[in-house]
Amino acid sequence: MAGCLAAIGLILGSAGAEEGLVLRDRVYLGLPEPTPQLLQTGVEVLRQRVVALTEGAIAVEVGEGAPQLSVTIADARPVASPLWTADQSYALSCDASGARVNAANALGALYGLMALPALLSQDEGGAWRLPVLRSDEAPDLLLRAAHMTGLPRSPLERRAWCRRLAALRLNALVVEDDIWWRLDDPIEREAAAAACADLRAHGIEPVPELPCLGRARALLALEPMCAEGSVVRRERLALSGDRPTVLARPNVLRTGATDIRLEDAQGRPYAMGRDYEVLDGETRYPYRPEATLFRVRRLPGGHIPDGGEVLASYDYVSCVNDYDVPYCPSEPRVAEVVGAALRNTLLCVKPAAVHLGYTRPALMNSDSRCLSREPRLTSAQLLAEDMQRLHGVAREIDPDVRVMVWADAVDPYHAPRALARAETAAALSLLPRDVILNTWFYGSDQPDREGAESLRYFGALG
């Protein structure tokens, strides 16, 4: 409703025009009925920040009285998403007669309220005051986001986080958490929905991050055989009697797309189950090098002669830095598991955007599942194919959802030597054009160079 007035009264007292508005010991808020949810949240955050800033000298209470702070909202309808709300502006003014926030919508009004505590100052006599001012403000960036690893499960802790983010006037939070992979569990689903509701009540759009490809810890904890492996070709083994012989490498991968295969010196394959059997060792995330080894044993009546030499080929997990183990994009099970997690997340949370990770992979195109594909794909083509597939899954479920990824796998300014080894930079031209690339320079000591170069590079490419 155009022209909806949300009157919030600060019944405090005043000083001369040159001194602005003096705050005494009690603030009364007069709220409209009904009050938009975001405005209710803004009042609560304002209350807590003022009490904390003044060390309890000023109490903020809801009550009636002649309003000295008024908030005018042109459109009081609920904001569809804090992330893509086009107009987030507000006008803030203050003089001896009171303070005023004029905003296009409840989101702008929230930001106006968040500006007030930063304007409070204490004079030499100990009085708190708002200065005389007039300011028209709008964010330079439509998207203002933070990244969090691990969603607080405690409602009190989570809401404290929300208040801090709202005070910074952020409008999105990228949340990396294993919970997105477990939403088939009703308890986890309820926890995720509650957390997202808290964020939205504070004007913050939750952006679930399901780390794909480069750092696949959450997926690999569920499906350890989906890891990207290194291929072993024609390892020599001697099989005698029915005694098992160990393979040289730990953490062997066995799926419908890769397994332990034996052949003779001429390359003729032996049949598993007829000529030999596999005695499983241990392949479990986080892939410890001391894991129990796999063994093979000849079967009586098969074609492997007693005491004969065979050649074993298989894939194993060689990347034992558990944080950086990627999944294999050519493993069919990956598409099933990631697709299901993405579907559950979009249906449960209904986010305006979803983050798929895609941190630069430490290892890629190195096991038989990728190397045996016809035609053979480059690492860049494999990355692009994987992202295109998941982008398609997301858009099939929600045609309006935006997809975000980390940019470092295609960013020539991010760890250029490692990127050259990964050979994924060429994927940039193959990615869907509407994917949002997030540059990543954590803890940079050269912020004027690192990150800025990346933004110029991607901006020039459109």
Image (spheres, helix red, strand yellow):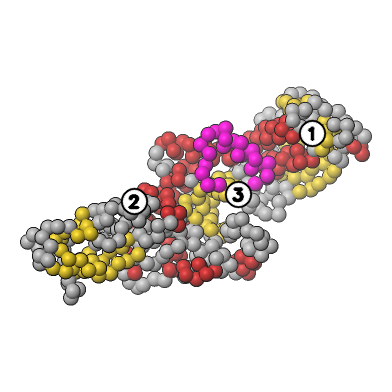
Above or below residue 21? Residue 250 is below
**Are dots 1 and 2 in contact, CB under 8 Å?**
no
Q: Between disc 1 and disc 3, whose residue precedes?
A: 1
Quadrant the C terminus occupies: bottom right
From the image, tell me which residue sits under label 2: 284
Q: Position of residue 256 (x, y in %)?
A: 27, 58
From the image, tell me which residue sits under label 3: 146
Residue 150 magenta-drawn?
yes
Q: Between disc 3 and disc 2, whose residue precedes?
A: 3
The label on residue 419 is none
Foreground disc of the pair 1, 2: 2
Quadrant of residue 36 within the rendered picture:
top right
Q: Position of residue 445 (x, y in %)?
A: 65, 59
From the image, tell me which residue sits under label 1: 69
Quadrant the N terminus occupies: top right
Q: Nearer the viewer, residue 96 or 216?
A: 216
What's the residue at 41%, 65% (across, down)?
Answer: 364
Q: Which residues are magenta?
A: 148-170
Q: Nearer the viewer, residue 114 or 58?
A: 58
Left or right: residue 300 compared with residue 143: left
| Residue 306 visible, this orientation | yes
Above or below residue 83? Residue 51 is above
What's the residue at 58%, 58% (across, down)?
Answer: 440
Q: CA distance from mark 3 to mark 2?
A: 32 Å
**Are dots 3 and 2 in contact, CB under 8 Å?**
no
